């Protein structure tokens, strides 16, 4: 198994306790300009409804990401922090052009 194009897997754990199964994975962005360098993905299962929820959060340090994983596995974690939006390095859009002048018309 190798890392993907955008993230490297740093840690993962699957807990399949009856009534509270969960998978957590901590990832590191391979792009040094990524908005949130460390991400946590948590997949939670509802065995009564036969559904699952996948959530993603962003962290500034690996320690914060791993602490959240430990807290989630112990049942004490708060919500995942949002992933910061990516900073755009694109040039600003050009100003709109003025409308083209109307051609002269003949008077009647």
Image (cartoon, rainbow, N blue to C red):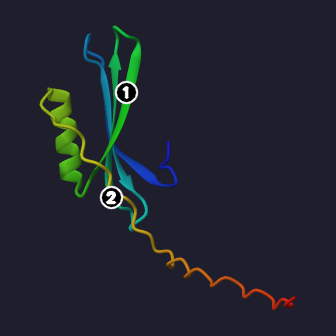
Q: Residue furthest front?
A: 108
Above or below, 13 relative to 63 = above
State if disc 1 and disc 2 touch (CB < 8 Å): no
Q: Residue furthest top?
A: 48
Q: Along the polypeptide, which appears first: circle 2 or circle 1?
A: 2
Which residue shows up at 51% across the image and 79% down it? 91
In this view, the residue in front, 91 or 76, is 91
Secondary structure at numbered mark 2: loop
Report the number of numbered marks: 2
Indicate which disc residue 37 carries: 2
Q: Is residue 70 above or below residue 101?
A: above
Residue matched to label 1: 53
Q: Position of residue 87 (x, y in %)?
A: 39, 67
Who's the residue at 87% across and 90% down the image? 106
36 or 96, which lies in front?
96
Q: Secondary structure at mark 1?
A: strand
* Quarter holding residue 86: bottom left
Nearer to us of marks 2 and 1 is: 1
Q: What is the distance, in whole Å, between disc 2 and disc 1 at their CAs?
A: 23 Å
In percent of the image, x 43 and y 63: which residue is there?
31
Q: Residues within 10 Å of mark 1 (few under 14, many from 20)?
A: few
């Amino acid at each position: 198994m190798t890392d993907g194009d955008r993230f490297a897997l740093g840690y993962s754990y699957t807990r399949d306790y009856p009534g509270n199964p969960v998978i957590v994975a901590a990832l590191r962005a391979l792009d040094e300009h990524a908005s949130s360098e460390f991400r946590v993905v948590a997949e939670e299962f509802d065995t009564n409804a036969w559904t699952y929820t996948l959530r993603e959060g962003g962290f500034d340090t690996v320690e914060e990401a791993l602490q959240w994983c430990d807290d989630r596995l112990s049942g004490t974690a708060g919500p995942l922090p949002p992933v910061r939006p990516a900073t755009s390095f694109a040039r600003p859009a050009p100003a709109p052009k003025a409308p083209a002048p109307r051609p002269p018309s003949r008077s009647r």
